[in-house]
Image: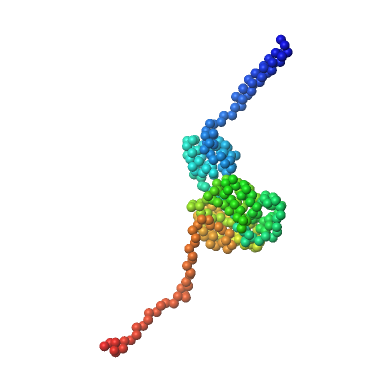
Amino acid sequence: MSLVWIATLSLGGIGAISAIILYFVAQKFKVYEDPRNGQVEAVLPGANCGGCGYPGCGGFAAACVKADSLDGMLCPVGGAPVMAKIAAILGKEAGEVTPKVAVVRCNGTCANRKKTSHYDGAKTCAIEASLYSGETGCSYGCLGNGDCENACAFGAIRINPETRLPEVDEALCTACGACVKACPKGIIELRNKGPKSRRMYVSCVNKDKGAVARKACSAACIGCGKCAKECPFDAITVANNVAYIDYQKCRLCRKCEAVCPTGAIHAVNFPPRKPAEPKVDAAEVKPIMPQAEAPQTPAENA
């Protein structure tokens, strides 16, 4: 037998034995994947934004299949219609999840917050925040470089060129949380959208004492506590010189907004307030005395 045949048979035998070994190893360590994973993933929007709390749409689909109930699970991009389709595929009931929206907790516009320095570095919030506190006296406020805008895959947040603050379009916001993660100052928060899209929040995160905060920004929360005393639902707490409204306790009565001396509390999508009627002091009101009738003349009596 020639050396060529010997080499061919040897290599063929080694290949066959290796294939058999690999087959049994693959069967031994085979990972079973529920076919419903693909069905659920097919109805998802495919944004892979991570707003659901899972690594992409594939991770969310697998979590839905494994979960005993869909309570608390929500695709922020697809919303309730997509969750209804998932529930139909899995034979489960779609849980009710309160929709959320991003809010910007800073009202330090160019008019409210004067510049004290000029930043001439890379125009990103992450880099500027790592170098110094910012161009104004408030070290907690928005830097205005648009990291949140760049992070949003849905075009739901834009930097206003006049105020240099981000503004959220709630019709486009999916509450994915990308802008929250991108903000190095932590001024963006996801909150319940609220009934009729109405919500209340303190648009300030400045932890400096009242006088210092007010000097840096005329619209800053000064931690006076008037809002907390006025709230009948214990929805407001004041900690580290700044107030915070718990949206789960808030009943949208707007009493806190009326007593805030700096306008730091914002009410969104409420109808305009009716002008207050002027109060009248009862002591100043003079009673109207009836006029005495004039005596009739003899000619009038005739």
The quadrant in which residue 60 appears is top right
Q: Residue furthest left?
A: 302
Tell me the quarter of the image containing the N terminus: top right
Q: Residue at x 55, y 57 (%)?
A: 266
Q: Residue at x 59, y 45 (%)?
A: 153
Q: Residue at x 57, y 52 (%)?
A: 168
Q: Is residue 164 above or below residue 87?
A: below
230 or 298: nearer the viewer: 298
Residue 146 position, x and y percent, is 63, 51
Residue 138 position, x and y percent, is 66, 58
Residue 125 falls left or right of residue 281 = right
In this picture the colour scheme is rainbow
Tell me the quarter of the image containing the C terminus: bottom left
117 or 139: nearer the viewer: 117
Q: Residue furthest right?
A: 3
56 or 200: nearer the viewer: 56
Whether residue 145 can be seen here = yes
Residue 203 position, x and y percent, is 59, 56
Q: Is residue 166 above or below residue 83?
A: below
The quadrant in which residue 212 appears is bottom right
